[in-house]
Image (cartoon, rainbow, N blue to C red):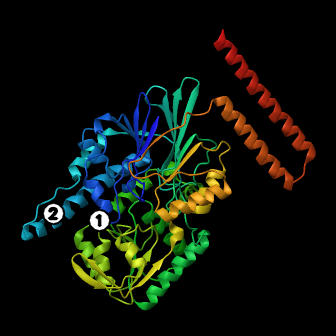
Amino acid sequence: MFLTFYGAADTVTGSCFMVESAKCRILVDCGMFQGSKEIKQRNYEPLPFPARSIDYLLLTHAHIDHSGLIPKLVKSGFKGRIIATGCTVDLCGALLPDAGHIQEMEVERINRKARRAGKPLIQPIYTADDALASLPFFDAVDYDEEISLCPNLRVKFRDAGHILGSALLELWIGDNDHETKFVFSGDLGNEGRPFVKDPTDLWEADCLVIESTYGDRLHQVANPKELQQKLHDVIWQTYRKGGNLLIPAFAVERTQDIIYDLFLLARENKLPPMDIWVDSPLAAQVTSIFASHHECYDQETIELIANGENPLEMPNLKFSQSMEDSQMLNRIPGGMIIIAGSGMCEAGRIRHHLKHNLWRPEATVLFVGYQAEGTLGRRLLEGEKDVRILGEEICVRADIVNIDGFSAHADQDMLVDWIKGFTVLPQQLFIVHGEPVAQHALRDRLIKDVGIMGIIPKWRETFSITRGRTPHDKLRQATAGFWAKLENYLATKPEPESFTEIMAKVNELERLIASHQEKGENEQAG
């Protein structure tokens, strides 16, 4: 078996991993590269593998850096099936055509300049029609539903708690009496966020591929109340200055999370009289998809709705659909909260709002998510005082604020604690989806706290995967791990009689495992 890293290696974005067994070739994610011009150029290069050779694409979630090259894959000859949760399938039905449309518009703008300069014209990676043509390849599955794909290969999607419908993957590949288990974290979610449940805990893996977006840092704000207070303070400071509050946010999850927290502030009468505009037809469509997938909601959101309170509905919440609506907002110098995409300020309507507000000292730009290296959002956070937007030089006089507690990603402590929860630790662990500093910081922490050495793969690097341990060996390790954890726990709460009783049951379980193993070996010998 082999594992190749065609994306999210040496960079945060472009998630794409290939698992090859003797009978099957699987892709996990097929994402678009985002960030610097050099990184984005990878999207235009030919696929590094024959599209027709892929049997299945397993999609962890709908974010474009995980799904954004699916139309290119189909356009290149892919004939297999794309497996994802039902919510992810619906979200991709909105996001992928939108991504194709953005590419068409961007290429049209670039080609206008190229024609005038006598330079070669370029083609979009794919069009909106190409994206629509990829949608029939999707199949929806439920969380925790185990499905068989190729011979001796099965997969289960577990809730990753990142965005609605996001999944971490358990993938088993059988080989005679051995079975190798892969776990792909996708993007592991932050704890305690609106709508989504906390990430699912797993207990064992042979090969683990773990993200490291926040592998070198801790979220500044962990308590939801503290997070709401920080948002409250930024809103009121902007209102008192008389300007607009701009919130660059991805259409999926981040926009809905912000609306949720604004709803909680509004129900406590803690918001000033400001209109809240979501300036994104895509975000409006995604919000409608959220409303149709209550099965993915966490308990808190379910209880709110049961009590007749919908966190996606407020009297002063307005959705801008047309370009005329968006342009109207640019003529109003203050008194509004404008949520618009993209989250890293690389495209979309937020760039127009920045052009009209960045130079105003009374305005505020609030970042609520990760900003990849090289993006306009990252440059603003790093303090650039002059930026070029839509061909015009803009000076930066607005306040630039960051609240990273809104992040949908687990931070370093959460990533380490999630791996600590494994009773049977992986034989091979690969750290991806992070900048080099974050990857190395997480690797060092895992060596120190978990005693496991992580591998940081290079882009397009291939690894031979160690054959999985036998079920008997895994059960023995699980039993030993459980025993050790129990002993550590009871050491702080001495209960000698209970401990002795539990130890006896553990010993009995071990004897039973050994007995079944011996019986199986005798039958094979016979």
Q: Quick one: label 2, few (<14), some, or many (20+) residues within 10 Å?
A: some
Residue 267 drawn above or below residue 204: below
The total number of labels drawn is 2
Q: Earlier in the sequence, mark 2 or mark 1?
A: 1
Q: Secondary structure at mark 2?
A: helix
Residue 411 drawn above or below residue 170: below
Q: For the point 85% across and 38% down, which residue is it?
A: 503
Q: For the point 38% across and 83% down, which residue is it?
A: 244
Q: Is residue 396 left or right of residue 1?
A: left
Q: Is residue 469 visible?
A: yes
Which residue in the rendered view is the most extreme toward the right? 497
Q: For the point 22% across and 47% down, which residue is it?
A: 130
* Closest to the observer, 249 or 168: 168
Q: Position of residue 98 (x, y in %)?
A: 28, 57
Q: Position of residue 67 (x, y in %)?
A: 36, 50
Q: Is residue 409 visible?
A: no
Of circles 2 and 1, the one toward us is 1
* Closest to the observer, 136 or 42: 42
Amino acid found under the numbered disc labelled 2: Glu
Q: Position of residue 443 (x, y in %)?
A: 57, 57
Residue 515 drawn above or below residue 144: above
Q: For the point 16% across and 58% down, which residue is it?
A: 122
Amino acid found under the numbered disc labelled 1: Lys
Measure the C-alpha gap from mark 2 to mark 1: 18 Å
The residue carrying mark 2 is 108
Residue 381 found in image quarter:
bottom left
* Closest to the observer, 464 or 170: 464
The quadrant in which the C terminus is found is top right
The residue carrying mark 1 is 37
Q: Quick one: label 1, few (<14), some, or many (20+) residues within 10 Å?
A: few
* Res 305 label: none
